[in-house]
Image: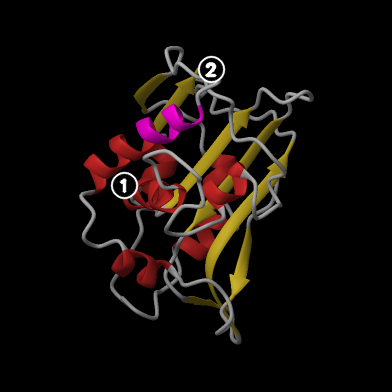
């Protein structure tokens, strides 16, 4: 399992969760999520006819989230926000319920390219914010991620993919858009992420 890394707050770093929410406050989150998930899958169809693309939405309440939402994520998500001091994210509730919205797509290329390359499809979905560099198609990678994040009580989203590239590697990237917050005496943080290549972890049913 990879480790969460949270960025120290600096003027040259990406906006925190408060700015993120303001940027996309006019979105209808549920409608935007459905639209963008379907459109981005169609844009990434493995065949030109797009006949093979299937998108499924699945709500699960049996996922073991201890690794994903335990420390250090829980420490950061539970810290007081500079912007909204009364904001309390339901971290413990999420860990107990195991409730996750899964969006599956089939018949697509997967999120191709090096996940650390800013021009790759994977990075543009999970690393970019707002707008789209896609030469054609109706989806917009940045707004697609925004819709997913705004539908999350923890402002957190994960992308897991196996591509049709020659190596067929699996990849995982998680991003959390928390408000600016303080841990310890001197350090303040906001946006966090986890980036793991060749990742073979999957949301598994909780062992009873």
Q: Which residue is drawn at 42% across and 25% down?
A: 62
Q: Is mark 2 on a helix, strand or loop?
A: loop
Q: Is mark 1 on a helix, strand or loop?
A: loop
Query: In this rendering, which labeled residue sits more in front, label 2 or label 1?
Result: 2
Look at the picture and state if 12 lies above or below 207.
below
Q: Which residue is drawn at 65% across and 26% down?
A: 163
Q: Give the range drawn in magenta.
A: 38-44
Look at the picture and state if 168 lies above or below 6.
above
Q: Earlier in the sequence, mark 2 or mark 1?
A: 2
- Residue carrying label 2: 47
Predominant SS of the magenta segment: helix
Q: Position of residue 69 (x, y in %)?
A: 52, 47
Q: Who is closer to the viewer here, 133 or 32?
A: 133
Q: Position of residue 110 (x, y in %)?
A: 58, 29
Q: Which residue is drawn at 55% across and 40% down?
A: 66
- Residue carrying label 1: 151
Look at the picture and state if 80 lies above or below 20.
below
Q: Position of residue 132 (x, y in %)?
A: 46, 52
| Any part of residue 149 in sight | yes
Give the quadrant of residue 86: bottom left
Q: Which residue is drawn at 55% across and 20% down?
A: 46
Q: Who is closer to the viewer here, 30 or 153?
A: 30
State yes or no: discs 2 and 1 in contact (Cβ < 8 Å): no
């Amino acid at each position: 399992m990879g480790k969460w890394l949270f960025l120290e707050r600096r003027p040259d770093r990406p906006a925190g969760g408060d700015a993120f929410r303001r940027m996309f406050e006019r979105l209808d989150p549920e409608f935007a999520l459905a639209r963008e998930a379907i459109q981005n899958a169609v844009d990434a169809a493995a065949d030109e006819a797009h006949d093979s693309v299937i998108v499924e939405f699945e709500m699960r309440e049996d996922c073991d989230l201890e690794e994903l939402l335990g420390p250090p994520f829980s420490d950061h998500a539970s810290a007081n926000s500079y912007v909204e001091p009364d904001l309390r994210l339901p971290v413990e509730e999420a860990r107990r319920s195991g409730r996750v919205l899964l969006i599956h797509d089939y018949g697509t290329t997967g999120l191709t390219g090096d996940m650390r390359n800013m021009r790759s499809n994977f990075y543009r979905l999970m690393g970019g914010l707002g707008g789209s560099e896609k030469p054609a198609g109706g989806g917009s990678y940045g707004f697609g991620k925004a819709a997913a994040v705004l539908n999350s009580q923890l402002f957190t989203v994960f992308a897991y993919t196996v591509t049709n590239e020659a190596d067929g590697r699996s990849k995982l990237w998680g991003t959390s858009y928390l408000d600016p917050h303080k841990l310890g005496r001197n350090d303040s943080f906001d946006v966090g992420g986890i980036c793991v290549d060749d990742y073979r972890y999957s949301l598994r049913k909780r062992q009873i």
